[in-house]
Image (cartoon, rainbow, N blue to C red):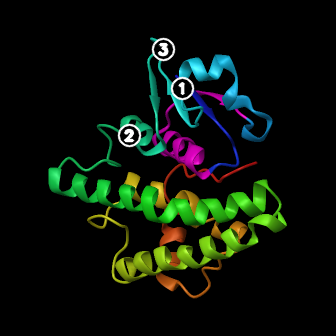
Amino acid sequence: MILYGDSKSGNCYKLQLVCSNLGQAYTWREMDITQGDTRTPEFLALNPQGKIPLLQREDGSILTESNAIINYLAKDSELVPKDPWLFAQVLRWQFFEQYYHEPNIAVARYIKLYLDSPQDRQQELKQKQQQSYHALDVMEQHLADKTFLVNEQYTVADISLYAYTHVAYEGGVDIKNYPAIKAWLSRVEQQPNYCPLCY
């Protein structure tokens, strides 16, 4: 199994964290999106969208989209609830992450970390930071009386949202006023075989 990704990317880190939690072996192919690695003819033949992360199985078959990949990697493990209702709750939080959380927190981080806060994107950065706090408000309210996002169980939903939440500060988003989120981040980091985001 080959995983294509950027070590700075939260979406790519999700895959590394799942594999580490479950002790799954893989080959990592580092991609530098700022140098056009995802726009080469070779990579576009794997994913015409030119996006990472990407999983390539031994038979050559391809899977894209971070949450789809981690759900596949974690199949039949405790990270994916067997009960259909609980799995639907996992998906609910993964959709929240991709449509409401990641487009704000990850983009703010991208502007600051990857692009070094260019002047012409300052207004966008401020808007993304403001929207990030709205997403964190939703998480804080939910986690106020819960250990994890779904059924008091560590699942791929937690991994999906942990990936960018724990580095939100790199986009200028401060979580100091979110005690439930901070406690939840700590619980994720205490899971067996946890691996930090390293770049």
Query: Which tag is nearer the camera, tag 2 or tag 1?
Result: 1
Query: Which residue is under mark 2?
Result: 74
> For the residue carrying disc 3, how many other residues have a C-alpha within 10 Å: few (<14), some (14-19), or many (20+)?
few
- Number of the label disc, if any, that sits on residue 58: 3
Q: Secondary structure at mark 2?
A: loop
Circles 2, 3 touching at the beta carbon (< 8 Å): no
Q: CA distance from mark 2 to mark 1?
A: 22 Å
The mark nearer the N terminus, 2 or 1, is 1
Q: Quadrant of the rendered structure where residue 196 is?
A: bottom right
First in sequence: mark 2 vs mark 3:
3
> Of residues 100 and 184, which is closer to you in this image?
100
Camera-side residue: 82 or 34?
A: 34
Whole-Å distance between the Cαs marked 2 and 3? 17 Å
Residue 47: give its label: 1
Q: How many marks?
A: 3
Does residue 53 belong to the magenta stretch? no
